[in-house]
Amino acid sequence: MMSLDKIALIIVIVAAGIYVGVMAFGIFASGVPLWPFFILLAIGIYLMSRVISDKLNNKEDKYYEDNIQE
């Protein structure tokens, strides 16, 4: 069974993806130069990947999930 924090993380990732898609559609439709947004998108993807990898690979969280019962 999937834990609640992983479900919440999936929901946040899906919501962020939808938000970025809607924002990209608005930017493409407006005709604004796109290069600044690609830089921001690259930074955002990098930060999100770091947060997700830290969350999924945290030894302390895994220890508490395996050994501590609520």
Image (cartoon, rainbow, N blue to C red):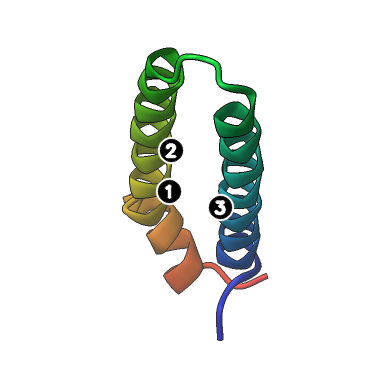
Going by the image, does 57 lie left or right of 23?
left
Q: Which of 55 and 40 lies nearest the eye of the viewer?
A: 40
Furthest toward the bottom, the residue is 1
| Residue located 61% across and 40% down the image | 25
Quick one: label 2 or label 3, which is nearer the N terminus? 3
Marked residue nearer the N-terminal end (2 or 1): 2
* Residue at the spot 65% in from the left edge and 67% down from the top edge: 4
Task: Give amino acid for label 1.
Answer: Lys
Q: Nearer the viewer, residue 4 or 38?
A: 38
Residue type at numbered disc 2: Met
Q: Quadrant of the C terminus?
A: bottom right
The quadrant holding residue 38 is: top left
Which class describes the residues within 10 Å of circle 3: few (<14), some (14-19), or many (20+)? Answer: some
Percent coordinates x, y for residue 46 in the rendering = 33, 32
Residue on which the image places disc 1 = 55
Residue under circle 3? 13
